[in-house]
Amino acid sequence: MGFFSRRRRHDPKTAQISVPKFEPSQSPEKRIDIATTLQYGRATGLPALADFVREFTLDHMLQGKLAYADDRADILLTCGSTDGFSKVVGCLGSPGDSMLVEEVTYPNALQTATPYGIRAAPVRMDRDGMMVDGPGGLRDVLENWDEERNGRRPHLMYTVTIGQNPTGVLLKRQRRRQIYELCDAHDVVIIEDDPYWHLQFTAESHRKPAAGEKPTYPFLAALEPSFLTIDTAGRVVRLDTFSKTIAPGCRMGWITAQKPIIAALVGATETSTQQPSGFAQGMVAELLCRSWGMDGWVAWLESLRDAYEERMLAMADILESGKELITVVSRDDLEVVERTQLYSFAKPDGGMFVWVRMNLRSHPAYRCFLARGNTKADLMAKLWDWNVLTQLVLASPGGIFAAAEGEPRDKADECFRFSFAAIELDEVKSATARWLKGTSEFWRLQAWEIEKIGEDETVVGAPGAAAAKREGGRMGRVLGRQDETGGRV
Ligand SMILES: Cc1ncc(COP(=O)(O)O)c(C=O)c1O
């Protein structure tokens, strides 16, 4: 089994790995061969790979700081975090439950929970993540839970704490501890979904070890630690994935939790996926356990962080430079400079996304557009169309991340989520600049011109838009539909 591309065989960046057919000299616990990986295997996964992941998680990710004894925790290989989450919800949730979530969140998680009869209970967020205090904060939601109106009190929380999808916020220690204490007091199990844990961009995450500190991997030691490091009660179930570090298509990840929970999840695995695909396990095990080893794997994670941080900074710089539309108008024989704020955003502390809040009210045609019977969401949809059609730039509409209708949806409807993950640095720069150009042009359109966008393939106004429209019209509609149905984002 080779891991190479024929087309790029001579590209020095392309490596080849091979998984041997038989490895009779190795004990069954250590074998990484095709004869083993392509047979029916254990629900706990290929032993050699499970050992590697266990060591990485307990010794290096958690720095040996699991809040209870290491021998009371375990890991379980999964077919990715979506699979892991589905099994956790299936084991720990019941129809009629409510699950605490950030007010905007990864939509797939909500869609996974819904068929189990589990509803979202949104908690307000600020720039530091899920809020603890204040109206709509965690304390308010838990202490003022109305059982008559909302049913049973929530005993599950789903949270994305690092580079949250979609907002990019990072939950720091103090807030993390407050959230944990509240969950402990109200007996809530915390499902910590952290696919972006290694992508932390804060000053703290770049910290060098202090004198006297000698961590095995300074990169990992400087990262914000998991809830598991403060989990004295064993109420945290952590989801990790190889989707953001090796490839989404390998469909592999792992769960870390106390052993009785892992035992229940092993049972759920035996009757569903049985184990991750043998092809994927063979290749990932060969890569991690033999080709890279722990040092190579951690070095890879660090290099990913650096590459994504560079892209994030490039995107944030361009967005920052274009936040205001500057126009010079003549008024009473004077030339007056007018500044219009188009949007606001915060540089993400981690992950793959920038969350941009549009200042729709600053659009000169805002009132007129609404007076003609349109809504704020219509204006956002037209802006989205416009940038797809004229600039070939596709942002995710914020509304699809709302955890509930009402206030969360209204707030999210004013936002776009940009991803800097799927394209190279140069394309990040040019796509962001194009979006900015399109948005500035959109702010100059009149209400009737906005209404016409996307109608019968007509793009009004934009210079040179016709050619882009022909391509973008097609692409925009296809991708747009995928996003709007809440497809994988
Ligand atoms: C928060 C979050 N969880 C899970 C996933 C998907 O993980 P997996 O591919 O391992 O199922 C994503 C991917 O976008 C995500 O953002």
Image (cartoon, rainbow, N blue to C red):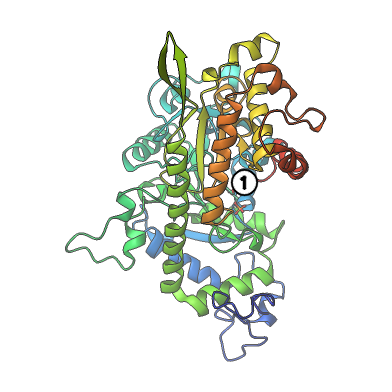
- Residue 447 visible within the image: yes
At label 1, counting other C-alpha atoms closer than 10 Å, the crowd grade (few under 14, some 14-19, many 20 or more) is some
* Residue appearing at x 39%, y 35% in the figure: 128
User: On the image, numbered disc 1 is attached to which residue?
Assistant: 91
Helix, strand or loop at label 1? It is helix
Relative depth, front residue between 170 and 82: 170
Relative depth, front residue between 107 and 38: 107
The amino acid pointed to by label 1 is Cys
Q: Residue furthest front?
A: 333
Q: Is residue 57 left or right of residue 149?
A: left
Relative depth, front residue between 57 and 371: 371
Q: Is residue 34 left or right of residue 148?
A: right
Corner quadrant of residue 44: bottom right
Q: Residue furthest right?
A: 456
- Residue 159 visible within the image: no
Relative depth, front residue between 361 and 103: 361
How far across and down, in percent of the image, does residue 331 sit?
A: 44, 11
How far across and down, in percent of the image, does residue 60 sit?
A: 38, 64
Q: Residue furthest bottom?
A: 25
Query: Where 438 sits versus 349, above or below?
Result: above
Query: Where 174 sits versus 82, above or below?
Result: above
Quadrant where the N terminus sits is bottom right
Query: Where 84 sits versus 71, above or below?
Result: above
Corner quadrant of residue 198: bottom left
Quadrant where the C terminus sits is top right
Quick check: is the Cβ at mark 1 less than 8 Å away from ligand 1?
no
How far across and down, in percent of the image, does residue 7 sit?
A: 69, 75
Query: Where 153 sits versus 276, above or below?
Result: above
Q: Is residue 406 left or right of residue 56?
A: right
* Residue appearing at x 41%, y 25% in the figure: 139
How far across and down, in percent of the image, does residue 465 sit?
A: 70, 37
